[in-house]
Amino acid sequence: MIKNLKRLTFILVLLFVTIVATACNSNGDGDSKSNKNKIDVGIVLPTKDEPRWVQDEQRFKDALKDSKYSTEILFSQGSSAKEKENVESLLNKGIKVLIITPQDGAAAGAAVEAAKKEGVTVIAYDRLITNTDAVDYYVTFDSLAVGAAQAQYLIDNANGSNVPLYLYAGAASDNNAFLFFEGAWKVLQPKIADGTFKLANSSEAEKLKDTAELSRDQLSKIIGQVTTNWDPNEAKNKAQTHLTAAKANLKGNVAILAPNDGTARSIADVFSTDKAVKSFVVTGQDAEKASIQYIIDGKQSMTVFKDVRTLVTDAMGVAVEVLDGKTPDTTGSYDNGSVEVKAKQTDVIVVNKDNVKKELIDSAYYEASEFNGLE
Ligand code: BGC
């Protein structure tokens, strides 16, 4: 009898312990609640596959070392679904400010609307989030100026007339791709019209060669044809296809508008293997280390240096003002298709062989030891 009672008590205690343990474990909410208020600022970047964004991560880490606010950086690996998960996971950690570079500017609307619902302040970082009112601030470089600088470089380095001009663009899901191309086209178009350049790889651009100011629709048509999707492999394949199709009069000394460094290097690699291409001038942007080496080696002509340190400082500056209950200073605004988003904008710097040392080494952006053959 007593033995049975003891056994029953033991079973009951075991049952109780199991129930309590299960309740604690399965209480996901409880778990995240204990984490609540742990993270002040959530940062979501598009992909680790491009040096540009790994660089931003490092610059954020450098800038945040001494911050009194806690932060967490997550990558979306090129997927809008992953991006939404990232935002949700940061919301569960109680973030008050979200700094986000969307993978796809329109698709990110749902993620930032979820953040807004929880009273989070949303800062679009480098890329605008479009067609939603759930963006509070936009910190950005002057993207029209990036495209204009690339175009001007091609003009300044073109000799004679009828120089074949190959156009490439970024991803149509990225609002910046439109701004870069728009900025470039405005500068290039008069030089196409006056015969300095002849278009080599875009029938859509050919149709619009007399139009100086392109509408979003017209930009879409050209970008749709010459997009790289920001993917160096896609850029390489497109360049190969274009060179295979090009007649002799579209070779010789050519000019190439490449939208960024990753795509510029792969396009340059393709053009340098075509014997009928005697020389080429190719643009870029981001001042990626690999492209700085290409510039030193004479394999890429220029890059547009966007000092990410400034963008990080601006983004965190806005975040801290918000956390401190103040109103951040802004310098202008961008229409995202739904609202005018208050913006803080930073200038860009053209870098080629002549000023690479001054702009990137003397400014302590990179160290000389990271490169070979730097004078
Ligand atoms: C950025 C560029 C970058 C590109 C591809 C753009 O939105 O402004 O710096 O090269 O995306 O990631």
Image (tube, rainbow, N blue to C red):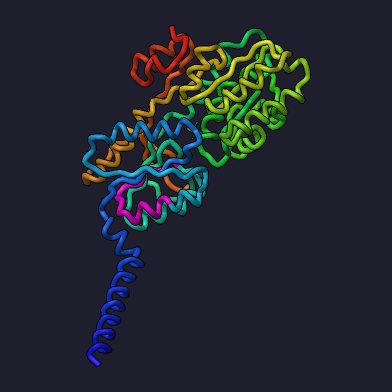
Horizontal side, residue 346 vs residue 329: left or right: right
Which residue is depicted at the point 58% across and 11% down?
A: 157
Which residue is depicted at the point 47% across and 26% down?
A: 286
19 or 187: nearer the eye? 19
Vertical relation: 102 (above or below) 116: above
Q: Quadrant of residue 264?
A: top right
Which residue is depicted at the point 47% across and 45% down?
A: 76
Pinpoint residue 58: horizontal percent, then vertical percent. Answer: 37, 32
Residue found farthest to the bottom? 1
Tally of marks: 0
Pinpoint residue 12: horizontal percent, then vertical percent. Answer: 28, 82
Horizontal side, residue 313 vs residue 260: left or right: left
Q: Quadrant of residue 321?
A: top left
Which residue is depicted at the point 48% across and 39% down?
A: 47
For the C terminus, the image quarter is top left
- Is 95 colored magenta in this rendering? yes
Give the magenta part as a residue range: 86-101
68 or 280: nearer the eye? 68
Pinpoint residue 293: horizontal percent, then vertical percent. Answer: 49, 17
Vertical relation: 147 (above or below) 72: above
- Is 257 colored magenta in this rendering? no
Horizontal side, residue 77 vs residue 201: left or right: left
Pinpoint residue 330: horizontal percent, then vertical percent. Answer: 32, 36
84 or 21: nearer the eye? 21
Query: Does the rendering let one see residue 82?
Result: yes
